[in-house]
Amino acid sequence: MTRYLDVQHMRQLCARVGIAELLRRIAAAIEADFRRWPDFEKSPRIARYAREGVIELMPVADRSHFGFKYVNGHPGNPRHGLPTVMAFGVLSDMHTGYPLLLSELTLTTALRTAATSALAARLLGRPDARCMAIIGNGAQSDFQALAFMTLLGVRALRLYDIDPAAMRKLADNLCAVCAASGMPPPEIRLCGSAREAAAGADIVTTLTAAQARAEVLTPDMLVPGLHVNAVGGDSPGKTELHRDILKNSKVFVEYLPQTRIEGEIQQIPELNATELWNVLNGTRPGRTSEHDITVFDSVGFALEDFSALRVLFELSSALEIGSQLDLIATPDSPKNLFGLLLHAPSEPSPDKACALTPCM
Amino acid sequence: MTRYLDVQHMRQLCARVGIAELLRRIAAAIEADFRRWPDFEKSPRIARYAREGVIELMPVADRSHFGFKYVNGHPGNPRHGLPTVMAFGVLSDMHTGYPLLLSELTLTTALRTAATSALAARLLGRPDARCMAIIGNGAQSDFQALAFMTLLGVRALRLYDIDPAAMRKLADNLCAVCAASGMPPPEIRLCGSAREAAAGADIVTTLTAAQARAEVLTPDMLVPGLHVNAVGGDSPGKTELHRDILKNSKVFVEYLPQTRIEGEIQQIPELNATELWNVLNGTRPGRTSEHDITVFDSVGFALEDFSALRVLFELSSALEIGSQLDLIATPDSPKNLFGLLLHAPSEPSPDKACALTPCM
C-alpha cells in the first residue's frame, strides 16, 4: 500500500517533531541532495498556463527514487477562498515504480522553500547577518522568518506589506510560535514601505505576488554587503528586482535551465549566474567580500521537494503518522489484472461455457 | 476536498456500470476529445529510466481542465509480485489549480488502452472484421479482447502466448465475463505460435512485453486487408514489428512527436505516419482499400487518460462512489497558511509577548 499524509497528518507531524526541528531536517536533506547534484536526472518543470495561473509538474530522480510535485500558482484564488499555491507529491521506488508515499505538499512547499532560502543565505550572506527585512507578508512569510531565525540565528525582523492586516498576521504568528515553543521572540518592526524595511537589514527577502515585471527593490535601496533572498517572482513575466540589481551583484540559482526561464535573471539572458550546488561543493566561489551584494534568485526546484518527501517518508514511518492508500491494483497473479474486475474476492470462478478449440 | 477512487472503488464502479458499458463510455470520451485535438496543449511524456524500467508523467490540458497520469513500466515486477504497469492520476480545474479527482489508473489504463485500440480498429480495419489474433496474453489482453467484442463485434479470438498458463487465464476470464454478463461467448482458439494465431485473423493485436527490438510479427505472416493493433512496444528500444511491415502498410499514431521516440516507427525515422485525430475529422485518409494493411502504432497518449479521468469523475460523482481526501491545505484565511501549524482548530490564540515597534 502507499503511505498517505494528508493535511491533518502533516499538522500532527509538525506538532510531534516541532516546526524548527522539521526545518532543520529538511534543510539538512536539501543540502545533502544538492551536494550530490550529478546523481540526479534533472529538467525544467512542465507548466500548463491558463489565464488565471499555472499548473506545474516537477519530477526528479536518482537511481533509487523518483519524486514529483504537482503545484499551482493562481494569484486570484484568495478571492475564491483558496490559497494561491496548492501542492501534493509522490515519492516512488525507481527499481519497481511503486509509489511509496503520497503527501500534501502545500505546507511542505512553504517549509522547503524557506529551508532552501536559509541554506542559501547561510552560504552566501555575511556571517554576522542578524536582521532581515521581509517584503510581502503573505502565506510564505511566516515560514521564511522561522527558517532564518532557526537556521541563521536572525533576531530582528523588519516587515512590510501593502496590506497592514498581513503584517499584523505575520507578527502575531511569530509571537505565538515563540511563546508556544519557548524560542526567544525576535524584535519585530512594522514598516511603512519596502524602502524603510530594507534600510538597516543584513538580508532582504522579497515574497510578493508580483504578476508583472515589478520593482519591489531598486538599486538605491541596497547597500554593500547585503544578501537578497528573491523568492516571489517565479515564472515568465513575474519579477521583483530592478534589473540593475542583477548587474551589480553576484547571482546564485538552483537549476540554471529552469531559472533562466522563470527567475529574476530572465530579465538579462546573458547574465552570469552560479548554481548553488557548486558553491556547496566549493567548486565555485560564493561571497568573496563583505562588500559583495549577493542575490539568491529562488524559483523552486524539484530536488527540494524530493528531499522534503524523503524526510516526510522517514519521519512518518518512524512516528507511525499517516494512513495507507489502496491506490495501486496489485492482483495476486500479476498477469491477471482483469481478475480484479471479474469477481469479488470470495466468489468462486464461474463454469467454463465457451467453445475452446486448441490448435495443438 | 478531492474526490478519491481507489482500487476497491474502481471495482465497485465497474460492477455498477458494467465493464462493457464503461468501455463504451471511455471510447466515446476519447473520440470526442481526439476530435477537438487542437484544444489541448500537448507534449511527449516525461520519462525517467532506471535499469529495471521507466517511470513517466503524462500531462495534458485544455482551457478548463488539467490531467496527468503517473505510470511505470518494469517488466521484471511480476517476479516481485507486482504488476509490470501501475498507474494513478489526477484531474484538476485549470481555473483554480484545484485537484478534483485522484484515481487509481492501473485498471483504468488497461480500459482506455483497449478502448483506443478498438476505436482505431473501427476506424481503420475492414468493416467486416470479426476475428482477432491476440499475441501476448498478459495483463492487458483481457481488456483488449472485451473492447473489440463490445465495440467492433469481434466474435472469434485466436490466442498465443509463450506461457500456456497465460493463454488459459485469458480464455477462462473471457468465458467467465460472458457467463456473468449474458454476453454471447466468443469462439476461442489456443494456438501454438504467433504465426498460427495471425493466420486467418482480420485483426492482429500484439501485446508482448518486448524488452528489445523483437520481431513478433514478420511481413510473411500478414495478408492484404489486415489491421495490426501494435500495442506492446511503447518505449525506445522496445518494438514488436519487423520494420518491413511498416514500409508496406499505412501507419497511424496518436501523437506523432511522442510516437517517433517510443513507437514502432522509431525504427524508420523518416516514415510517413498519420495522427488518428486527422482521420477522425476526415482531414486525412485512413484505409483506402480492402487490400491495405493498416497499422495502429499504439504507445499510449496523455489525452486518453484525460478522457478516462473525465468519465470516472462524472460517473463516480453521479453514482456516489469513492471518498474524499483532505489533500490540499485550505486555511480559512488564504494568506495565513502558517496558522494551520500554529494551533489545533479549537485552541485560542496565545497572548502576544513580542517587542513590536511600529515605524508609523
Image (cartoon, coloured by chain):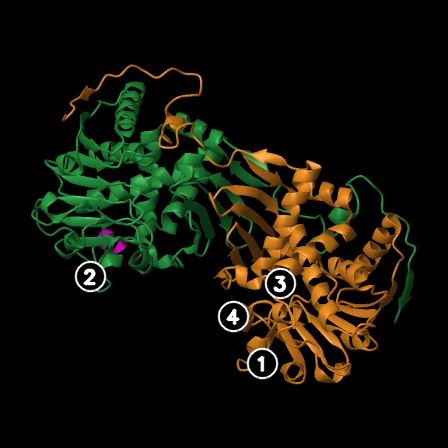
Chain colours: A orange, B green
Whole-number angstrom distance, CA of label 2 to CA of label 1: 44 Å
- Residue of label 3: A35
Q: Which residues are magenta?
A: B277-281
- Residue of label 4: A257
Residue B330 can be seen in this image: yes
The image quarter containing residue A260 is bottom right
Where, quadrant-wise, is the C terminus of chain B in this rendering? bottom right
- Which callout, 2 or 1, points to the residue nearer the camera? 1
- Which residue is rendered at x = 22% and y = 36% of the image? B134
Where, quadrant-wise, is the N terminus of chain B in this rendering? top right
- Which callout, 1 or 3, points to the residue nearer the camera? 3
- Which residue is rendered at x = 13% and y = 40% of the image? B127
Q: Position of residue B10 (x, y in %)?
A: 45, 32
Whole-number angstrom distance, CA of label 4 to CA of label 3: 18 Å
Residue type at the position of mark 1: Asn
For label 2, the SS is: loop
Whole-number angstrom distance, CA of label 1 to CA of label 3: 21 Å
Whole-number angstrom distance, CA of label 4 to CA of label 2: 34 Å
Residue type at the position of mark 4: Pro
Whole-number angstrom distance, CA of label 4 to CA of label 1: 13 Å
Callout 3: residue from which chain?
Answer: A
Circle 3 crowding by C-alpha within 10 Å: few under 14, some 14–19, many from 20:
some
Same subunit under labels 4 and 1?
yes
- Residue of label 1: A272
Residue type at the position of mark 3: Arg
Residue A177 vertical position relative to residue A233 in the rendered view, above or below: above
